[in-house]
Image (tube, rainbow, N blue to C red):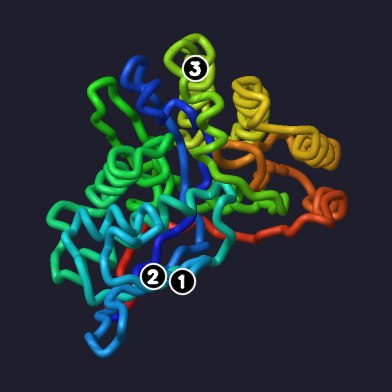
Amino acid sequence: MIISRTPYRLSLFGGGTDYPSYYRKYTGEVISTTIDKYVFVTCRYLPNFFKENIRVSYSKIETVNNIQDIKHPSVLSVLKFLNIKKNIEIHYDGDLPGKSGLGSSSAFTVGLLNAAYCFKNKKINKNKFDLGLKAIHVEQNLNKEKVGSQDQTAVAVGGFNNIHFKRNGIIQVKKINLKNDFKKKLNRNFLLFSTGKFRMANKIAKTYVHKLSKKENFFEEIKQITLEAKKIMLSNNKNINDLGKLMHESWKLKKSLSNKISNSFIDDLYDVGIKAGATGGKLLGAGGGGFLLFYVPGSKNKIKKSLKNLIHVPFKFENEGTKIIYK
């Protein structure tokens, strides 16, 4: 039995510039981090005793004899990609719900690739970054999904990263090394809440992805905000609280892309958070629902009381990315 563990991610700045339709024309710039909430993927050999020789368990249970009959797109694509045709059982578990804006789909794809390579007794010759690139290939090229390229990379390598997307398709990951005091303060000032509303990210993204190549000026503003945030993080200076203001500006810009990114329900929750002491925040992921992240430099009690009908999810930053925890 093999078990992989892959973290969820928080996309902090630059989301949207990681879509190929944009960065292959203008380049992209993203800052993200991973947190100590995880997707677990188990792979084990399924003996010939059973009627079906492939079993897949997620929100549904699939039992088939031919991989072509598998309904889950990423499972189908990964098994075909690695030429695994039979005698495998795959099980998925997650600390948090899917369709929530935390990169759960990509965390599953990366975790499945990691476990499946181990299942075949193959090592990833390069590094975890290579798993991220393979996950991008699976989701964008094999599954034909309208998704960006940051989630797969972020959850594969883990930690705080500045991810740069070049016009030629090359992706570069640069670690952002934060001093412990700065990192702890940043962790304390971020509050994560579940809105209780979940959606398919690629369906939301379809409402605006086709517009991205025509939004150069719009995304130049997004990238400038991202670069300002990076300066604050790299300098580990006293301007840490400016990150909240930058998140607020970035969120205002992003939700103007499409009327599907936010709605009156999300806007009302965001306004409550701002009135209760947050200096900024954002809805994580493509939009429409999922998790709200707030930056709260002062007391956290007021915002927790004001949003008491939502589930508050405490978390800590993590640095490991995807890993095999049992084999």
- Tell me if residue 121 comes above or below residue 208 in the rendering: below
In the image, taking residue 249 as reference, residue 181 lies left or right, namely left
Residue assigned mark 1: 61
Q: CA distance from mark 1 to mark 3?
A: 37 Å
Say which element carries label 1: strand
Q: Quadrant of residue 248?
A: top right
Tags 2 and 3 in contact by the CB under 8 Å rule? no
Total numbered badges shown on the rendered structure: 3
Quarter of the picture containing the C terminus is: bottom left
Nearest to N terminus: mark 1 or mark 3: 1
The amino acid sitting under disc 1 is: Ile
Q: Is residue 2 visible?
A: no
Nearest to N terminus: mark 2 or mark 1: 2
| Closer to the eye: label 2 or 3 | 2
Q: CA distance from mark 2 to mark 3?
A: 37 Å
Residue drawn at point x = 48 percent, y = 28 percent: 16
The amino acid sitting under disc 3 is: Lys
Percent coordinates x, y for residue 240 in the rendering: 60, 36
Percent coordinates x, y for residue 214 in the rendering: 46, 11
- Which of the pair 221/204 is nearer the observer? 204
Task: Kindly identify which numbered label has been placed on residue 211.
Answer: 3
Q: Is residue 119 visible?
A: yes
Residue assigned mark 2: 56
Q: Quadrant of residue 12?
A: top right
Tags 2 and 1 in contact by the CB under 8 Å rule? yes
Counting other residues with Cα less than 10 Å from the Cα at mark 3, is it few (<14), some (14-19), or many (20 or more)? some
Say which element carries label 2: strand
Residue drawn at point x = 31 percent, y = 21 percent: 24
